Image (cartoon, grey):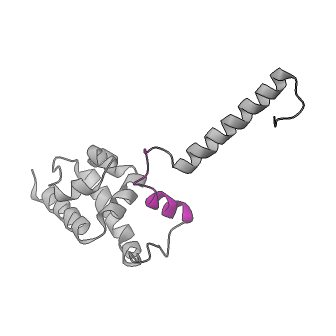
Amino acid sequence: MDNERIEKWEKIRHYLLERDAALFAAKLRQEGILARIFPESVANPLPVVSRSFDLNVPAEQADQALDLLKEWELEFENYDSSQESYHDISKEEIFYLKNLETKGRFPSWNFVVIGLLVLLLISLIIGAVISGSNTILF
């Protein structure tokens, strides 16, 4: 393995350890790069940071990741973790980043309750139609 590739991955690893790793991993995931480099990190990016990286990744992927690091460096400097806000990204990206940890979980209970109420209303309407009543209430 060439020293240049190892050096690149050490720079990325150092950057991730210094900065907000989950946020950076989310940005890489948006670009589709993280999934190709670290497939297990798509579900949970944080354990990837603590382990050593796969140094057998092709050099062009390391270059892509380093280019993204340079591109996003100013954005991370503008990130205010105390207020969990960005100054230079869209609302859609903020929504995406804030909802990463809830992705794939069971829907919130509000949606379940609303769904059950809608089903109850539909069954009342069907019951009223079958019984020949003109009103939904008994």
Q: Is residue 76 left or right of residue 39?
A: right
Using residue 58 as the reference point, say whether residue 118 is left or right of it.
right
Which residue does the image show at 22% across and 54% down from the upper left? 47
Instruction: State the image coordinates of residue 2 (x, y, percent, origin top left).
Output: 10, 54
Q: Is residue 133 above or below residue 88?
A: above
Q: Nearer the viewer, residue 66 or 52?
A: 52
x, y (%) of residue 8? 19, 61
Name the residue rendered at 30%, 58% in the picture: 65
* Circle count: 0
Taking depth in this image into account, of 38 and 58 the one nearest to the observer is 38
Name, please, the residue furthest toward the right. Answer: 134
Q: Position of residue 66 (x, y in %)?
A: 29, 62
- Residue at the (72%, 30%) spot, across then down: 123
Inspect the magenta stretch and tell me whether residue 61 lies in it. no
Closer to the camera, 101 or 94? 101
Q: Which residues are magenta?
A: 91-105
Q: Residue at x 35, y 51 (%)?
A: 33
Residue 33's place in the image compared with 68, above or below, is: above
In the picture shown, does residue 50 fall above or below 113? below
Q: Is residue 102 magenta?
A: yes
**Residue 138 placement, left or right of 28:** right
The quarter of the picture where the C terminus appears is top right
Q: Quadrant of residue 19?
A: bottom left
* Direction front: furthest residue: 138
Q: Horizontally, is 3 left or right of 38 in the view?
A: left
